[in-house]
Image (cartoon, rainbow, N blue to C red):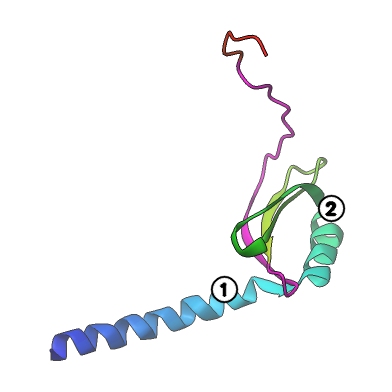
Amino acid sequence: MKGKIALGLILMMLAGPVWAQSLRNCGPREAIVQRLTNSYGETRQSLGLGKNNDLVEVFASPDSGSWTITVTKPNGMMCLVASGQAFETLAEALPDDGKDA
């Protein structure tokens, strides 16, 4: 029993910094969009709705190739999910399944 309590305390201590780290990657949508535009030259390239009406967006710079994926909650809080380099725009068609429409 003491071992389980100790393990629980350790996990809670480790979760604190992770939670704090995630808060640094979130903020008001307007401020983050402005920073993506001004600092990285990224503009919105695509969007979609996720669970709980979360807005998922991809921002990218055609010039530098940098990209960022964000999620915005209905309350306007936006969080950075992923970012990287070598963004490319694709327009791939669905494969022909051999059937008439």
**In the foreground, 42 or 64:** 42
Please provide percent x and percent y for residue 24. Answer: 63, 76
**Label 1 – label 2 distance at C-alpha:** 23 Å
List the residue tagged with mark 1.
22
**Residue at 72% over, 30% down:** 90
**In the foreground, 77 or 63:** 77
Please provide percent x and percent y for residue 78. Answer: 71, 68
CA neighbours of label 1 inside 10 A, class few (<14), some (14 to 19), many (20+) = few
CA neighbours of label 2 inside 10 A, class few (<14), some (14 to 19), many (20+) = some
Task: Name the front one of labels 1 and 2.
Answer: 1
The C terminus sits in image quarter: top right
* Residue 94 drawn above or below residue 7: above
Left or right: 69, with 34 as reference point: left
Which amino acid type corresponds to the residue marked 1 in the rendered image? Ser
Magenta range is 73-95
List the residue tagged with mark 2.
41
**Residue at 74% over, 34% down:** 89
Please provide percent x and percent y for residue 21. Answer: 55, 76
